[in-house]
Image: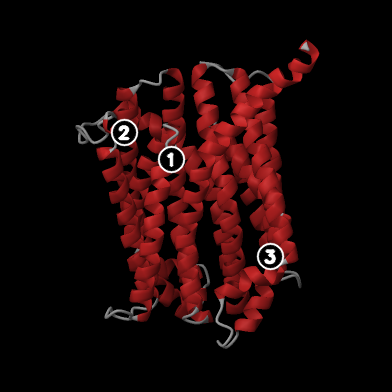
């Protein structure tokens, strides 16, 4: 009897961890998918304005993402900081309030310089060699889109608070409402429906900015009224400086921001390289990368749950819990991304067709090229999931500086130069750019997993 019971006793902590990880990750996954659905809605509607509008929107969106994702990385420091504190002491009300407050201060710090940068979008795009007409159209879009940065960063701070408390469901509810609002606002403002002016691409920027404000307002209402969150009094004495905590936030958040920026900027760089090849390649790339972004939201959500679970175990001094949380997150991500790779290989046409109006001139050429690019997206699915989960579980240990260096090596030392070389100086053209992306992601995935394994093998997980 004891021999039979032993495997069950060994398996039980893993089953408990898997259940906890799934319970925490599914609202985060759905929140990420819903947030990406807002961008997908924008791209879908841009496609119905025509291939040139889609190409201009892709240029503007990629420049916007360069600023946005750095901010997302910095703001993600809220989750590991809170998770470690709550692992040490689940009643750490004052420490939680201080961290969230400084997260909101960081949101304000980030937004101002980004607004100034994006206001110069046309000059930046032309400096990067992009088509003048597309650069002008992209700038009009960005000048309405950029105002959503501050409310979105504020939303991220409050979402990180809910995640660290392992109560992420309200963030999903709020963003789901925002997705519906964004779709309606896009339809009205881009195409002049229901009596609204027909603004084209700038209308999409207005819709997204209003949606970001709605997301922040929704979470402010939740944390102010729900009794589980109200006791933290997050906005009490908001104006009082807490410089030690502010500096601690940036020490952890800045390397995360740079790491995430390294990753996303290689995709932005790929879009700019596509723009040098031609509008058809750029439009096809925008569709393929949007589809890959949707699948990426699942391992991203699993990784966010992994940050919380690893951080809580780290704060509590539970070495076994740290190992189980990391391995569980990696296993779930690999299983999902393998399935997505098969779908991209076997049915690319069903994924691409909704993005284009077949009656528009050039739509067939864009669709064919987008399906071709999806083959390469399928190839790097598993690596993409592994690298984001690997970085996320390392954040749960407060380990952000070395992963930042590893990301820089993989993305900018290998991936982007290879994309540029294969795309611009070989007959592979757009395919060469995607090959470079796949290799860069694979290198980063291997490096992140090596770092995680090394922390375990050498006992570098310093328990609190």
Question: Is residue 173 visible in this depiction of the protein?
Answer: yes
Check disc 3 and report its element: helix, strand or loop.
Answer: helix
Indicate whether 72 appears above or below 43: above
Please name which of the two marks, 3 or 2, marks the residue nearer to the observer: 2
Residue linked to disc 2: 229
Indicate whether 156 appears above or below 354: above
- Residue drawn at point x = 56 percent, y = 40 percent: 303
Tell me if mark 3 has few (under 14), some (14-19) or many (20+) residues whose alpha carbon lies within 10 angstroms of its own. many
Across and down, in percent, residue 23 comes to: 53, 37
Residue linked to disc 1: 168
| Rendered image quadrant of residue 420 | bottom right
Tell me if mark 1 has few (under 14), some (14-19) or many (20+) residues whose alpha carbon lies within 10 angstroms of its own. many
The quadrant in which the N terminus is found is top right
Distance (Cα) linking label 3 and label 1 = 32 Å
Whether the residues at callouts 3 and 1 have beta carbons within 8 Å, the answer is no
- Residue drawn at point x = 43 percent, y = 53 percent: 68
Distance (Cα) linking label 3 and label 2 = 43 Å
Of 203 and 277, nearer the camera is 203
N-term-proximal mark, 3 vs 2: 2
Distance (Cα) linking label 2 and label 1 = 12 Å
Tell me if mark 2 has few (under 14), some (14-19) or many (20+) residues whose alpha carbon lies within 10 angstroms of its own. some
N-term-proximal mark, 2 vs 1: 1
Residue linked to disc 3: 374
């Amino acid at each position: 009897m004891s021999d039979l019971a032993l495997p069950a006793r060994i398996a039980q902590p893993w089953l408990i961890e898997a259940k906890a990880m799934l319970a925490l990750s599914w609202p985060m996954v759905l929140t990420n998918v819903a947030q990406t659905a807002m961008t997908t809605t924008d791209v879908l509607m841009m496609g119905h304005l025509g291939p040139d509008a889609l190409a201009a929107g892709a240029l503007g969106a990629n420049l916007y993402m360069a600023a946005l994702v750095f901010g997302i990385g910095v703001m993600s420091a809220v989750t590991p900081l809170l998770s470690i504190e709550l692992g040490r002491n689940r009643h750490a009300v004052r420490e939680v309030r201080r961290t969230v407050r400084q997260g909101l201060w960081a949101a304000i710090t980030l937004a101002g310089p980004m607004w100034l940068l994006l206001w110069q979008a046309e000059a930046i795009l032309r400096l990067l060699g992009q088509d003048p007409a597309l650069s002008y159209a992209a700038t009009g879009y960005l000048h309405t889109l950029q105002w959503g940065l501050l409310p979105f960063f504020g939303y991220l701070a409050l979402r990180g608070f809910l995640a660290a408390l392992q109560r992420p469901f309200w963030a999903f509810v709020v963003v789901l409402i925002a997705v519906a609002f964004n779709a309606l606002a896009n339809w009205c403002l881009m195409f002049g429906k229901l009596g609204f002016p027909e603004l084209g691409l700038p209308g999409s920027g207005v819709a997204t900015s209003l949606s970001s404000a709605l997301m922040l307002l929704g979470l402010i209402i939740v944390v102010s009224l729900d009794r589980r969150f109200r006791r933290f009094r997050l906005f009490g004495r908001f104006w009082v400086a807490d410089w030690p905590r502010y500096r601690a936030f940036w020490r952890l958040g800045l390397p995360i921001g740079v790491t995430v920026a390294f990753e996303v900027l290689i995709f932005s760089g790929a879009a700019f390289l596509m723009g040098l090849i031609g509008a058809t390649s750029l439009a096809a790339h925008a569709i393929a990368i949007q589809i890959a972004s949707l699948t990426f939201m699942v391992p991203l959500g699993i990784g966010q749950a992994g940050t919380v679970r690893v951080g809580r175990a780290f704060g509590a001094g539970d070495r076994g819990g740290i190992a189980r949380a990391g391995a569980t997150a990696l296993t779930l991500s690999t299983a999902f991304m393998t399935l997505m790779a098969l779908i991209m290989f076997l049915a690319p046409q069903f994924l691409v067709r909704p993005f284009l109006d077949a009656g528009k001139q050039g739509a067939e050429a864009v669709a064919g090229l987008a399906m071709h690019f999806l083959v390469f997206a399928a190839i790097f699915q598993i690596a993409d999931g592994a690298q984001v989960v690997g970085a996320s579980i390392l954040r749960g240990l407060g380990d952000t500086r070395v992963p930042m260096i590893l990301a820089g090596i993989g993305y900018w030392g290998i991936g982007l130069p290879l994309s540029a070389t294969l795309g611009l100086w070989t007959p592979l053209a757009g395919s060469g750019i995607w090959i470079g992306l796949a290799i860069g992601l694979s290198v980063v995935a291997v490096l992140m997993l090596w770092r995680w394994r090394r922390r375990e093998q050498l006992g570098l997980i310093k328990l609190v």
